[in-house]
Image (spheres, helix red, strand yellow):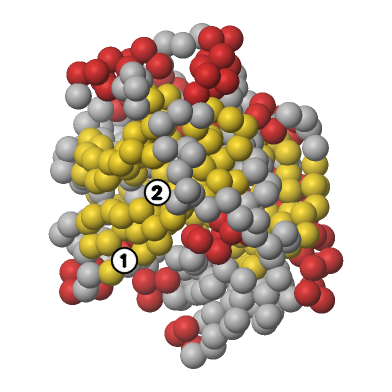
Amino acid sequence: MKKYLFAFMAACLILPGVAQDKFDTFFEKKSLRIDFALSGNAESQTAAIEQLREEPVWGGPLVNLVDPFRYGGYDVRIYDKASGELIYSKGFNTLFEEWRTTDQARKETQSWTNSISIPYPKKDIVFELAARDKKDMQFHPLLKMDIRPSSIFIDRGRLKANRVTQLMDQGDSNKKVDLVFLAEGYTAEEQEKFVADARRFMEALFQTPPFSRHRTDFNVWAVGAVSEDSGTDLSGENIFKNTALNSGFYTFGIDRYLTTRDMKSIRDAVWNVPTDAIYILINTDKYGGGGMYNFYACGTADHPQTPVIFTHEFGHSFAGLADEYFSSEVAYNDFYNLKQEPWEPNITTLVNFDSKWKDLIPAHTPIPTPTDSAYTDKCGVFEGGGYISKGIYRPMNHCMMRDYAPFCPACTRAIERMIRYYCDEGE
């Protein structure tokens, strides 16, 4: 264990030129996709590998290989087997993690398929999947296994080649954020509508600060997965559609919560496209969406609030931003431990506020900050956030992550830090 801890500390201190050499030493510019099952209930969970796949593209960073953020409910760590050195890591969330906090998970045990991609190793590796325990907010191993890159048990077959349209090309995918719009509920006859919708969403994103300042840091793709039916499931209204990604409203019984648990179909659809962030564009005019950090975000194409819903959900999936609202209906129980500091950069329990946005608050601002007119447009510490009205605090009274106002300074900084990470730039 000490060997791995030392390797982690050393990896965090690597200079950019040396890190590029490390990528070339340990990895190839293609991906190893790891499909795995998370099984369990409200009390416990386990993990098991379902499939390994070699895929032809790696669009992620070549320098920033060890995740500096430590965000998410799960963490994948890749060690060089021979030396024990940590050579790659990445945090993420899953829909299963949310399900474990619902009433259903107190009564049932389920198993959900999930998927992650890492750069393809040249040498034998140790793969470790860890889950964050809310009691201490630390990652604890769920699964560890050796992987040999030459193994005959790694699937190397080609998958269906969907129509891919590059909406914006700003350069080398390893030095840009590759945003992929993925079609859901668009039939073969509706593929031109999908491309037009994706282009409209792209422009909406780059009209929104801080993304408006970073257009040249993104490549944007539209992947036209074809569905048999138009639209998406409305299980609460007994409406079911045959779609490419098996999406639907009424996630956890909430009518506006639109997601899919079919990660395998999502990853199958983008197998040959550089992918740092996925937004599933769902062909309906109802209100709804969802987003999970480093997993995916999704939303509907034609509701009047579509552009801001997209930006809000993308804030979750891309930058790890928490919801800042606290009065809307949700299915979660005890989603945050008020005795610990949450990992999300835009909420705090004040347990370790120094690690959050304290440096962004104007002098003489009271903490907590009252919601009166004197502080309406100022960064502070406003009570309420993360679905809880007491004990959790947000950076501004209004923000994109609460009610579709402009991103607050804390969220803006988190987004820009993430952009620099994907573009292989330092803090």
User: Mark 2: which secondary structure?
Assistant: loop
What residue lies at 53% left-to-right and 36% top-to-bottom? 120
Q: Is residue 8 above or below residue 38?
A: above
Identity of the amino acid at label 1?
A: Ser
Marks 1 and 2: in contact by CB < 8 Å? Answer: no
| Residue 111: mark in rendering | 1
Q: Is residue 193 above or below residue 420?
A: below
Classify residue 39 by image quadrant: bottom left
User: Mark 1: which secondary structure?
Assistant: strand
| Residue 1: mark in rendering | none
What residue lies at 47% left-to-right and 83% top-to-bottom? 235
Which residue in the protein does label 2 denote?
Answer: 93
Q: Is residue 45 above or below residue 88?
A: below
Front position in the image: 100 or 334: 100
Q: Quadrant of the N terminus?
A: top left
Q: CA distance from mark 2 to mark 1?
A: 16 Å
- Count neighbours of disc 2 (C-alpha within 10 A) and say few if under 14, some if 14 to 19, many if 20 or more: many
Residue 252 shows in the view: yes
**Image side of residue 8 versus residue 106, left or right:** right
Classify residue 343 by image quadrant: top left
**Image side of residue 307 versus residue 245, left or right:** right
Mark 1 or mark 2, which is nearer the start of the sequence?
2
Front position in the image: 384 or 32: 32
Residue 391 shows in the view: no
Q: Is residue 147 above or below residue 222?
A: above
What residue lies at 68% left-to-right and 62% top-to-bottom? 160
Front position in the image: 54 or 349: 54
Q: Position of residue 401 (x, y in %)?
A: 49, 48
What residue lies at 52% left-to-right and 19% top-to-bottom? 25
